[in-house]
Amino acid sequence: MRHYFFTQSHPSERDAILAFQAEVTHPQTSVPVISKWGNLRQKLFGIDPKETTFVQRGFRPGNVQAQQQLEHIGYTFLQGYHAALADHKPDTLALRLNTIEAEWRGFAFEGAAMGLALLDALTPWQQNRLAKFMAGPGAAHIYMVHVGAGWILARLPWRRPVYLTQLNCRANAQSKIQNAKAIDPLLGWLAIDGYGFHEGYFNWPRSVEQKTIPKKLSGYARRVFDQGLGRSLWFVCGADCSHIPRKISTFDAKRHADLWSGVGLACAYAGGVDPAAIEALKSAAGKYQPHLAQGAAFAAKARQKAGNPTAHTEIACQILCGMGAGAAAEVTDQALENLPPVSSPQIGLEGKQEGAEPAYEIWKQRIQSHFSREMKP
């Protein structure tokens, strides 16, 4: 617990990470000054900004522009996280988060979700902060919010079996246990993706180099974990599009597809490289190009829904998906049509039975199948 949350910052560093909050407490913004309780929560559970630097994390140094891009993403995540600790009320929190530039704002919402999930976990008498945020201002960033909430599964181990049990019950039509919690049976899997990203980002020697899979993580959850782990490779490898494929090749072949899916998502959403590097990444993906494209399409949809499109997402989709970001996002929408809300046997596209996997996996497979057809010569 202390390793993750009780990382006391030097005052100057703490001032830096909270600088944007000082700006939005100006009377003209109508945002309340942080309360004493908010300051106490930040002091107790704050994360040192240096934890997001390549030097601190031991990530592969590479292109300076890419490194700066990825470090700023981590910094922005912490802005959102600390903002949630300061004041968890949805409207006030949203005011603070929306002061961040649109390109980076999704990462702030992701961090805020982690903060809200932490507060929910630590106060059994009030566990609705995250749910209220998702239903309110967080709805536009719903994909990032789910991912951010997954970080708590990494930092509070006792939450994992509870969450997985509830998620599997929601995703299984035959389950005799009804989950009273409001876990989305489709997007709820993104929290496991967030768990995987966290383990790659903070514990890459174990998760990436030693290929250690968390204990008690089994079944489909392992695959979604790998999607998040794939996203983390974009950071761990410094967005080096020649090194990432080599790193993936060191994993068991059964894990490659989901790792490539995560890489595609990170490439298109986080950015940091030029078109030539993305072209090289696509070429290196080989038979996993549809998985790379599916990840990029997920990124396009997340940005479209949040209203924060970027040039690098557009370029990545043009290269990886063979279409613009808007069209790629539309592919994800079309793949949701007649999607079984839970894992129940039914005949899917091209006469294929879709019941062995959760709806989330069926969604991904439909998108991958679309791009596979598009890529055929």
Image (spheres, rainbow, N blue to C red):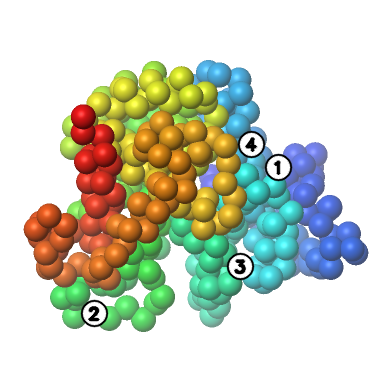
In the rendered image, residue 338, in percent from the top left (x then y), is placed at 25, 68
Whichever of callouts 3 and 2 sits on the residue coming sooner in the sequence is 3
Question: Residue 55, position in %: x, y?
Answer: 58, 25
Residue 249 location (% of width, % of height): 26, 25
Which residue is tagged 2? Answer: 177
Q: Write down the residue under mark 4.
A: 72
Residue 178, located in which quarter of the rendered image? Answer: bottom left
Q: Amino acid at mark 2?
A: Ile
Which residue corresponds to mark 3?
A: 137
* Residue tagged 1: 9
Type of amino acid under label 1: Ser
Are there few (<14), some (14-19), or many (20+) residues within 10 Å of tag 4? some
The residue furthest right is: 27
Q: Three-letter amino acid code at disc 4?
A: His
Tell me, yes or no, whether the two marked residues, 3 and 2, touch with CB atoms within 8 Å. no
**349 shown above or below 241:** below
Mark 2–mark 1 Cα distance, whole angstroms, equals 44 Å
Q: Given the image, on which type of amino acid does mark 3 rest?
A: Pro
Q: Nearer the viewer, mark 3 or mark 2?
A: 3
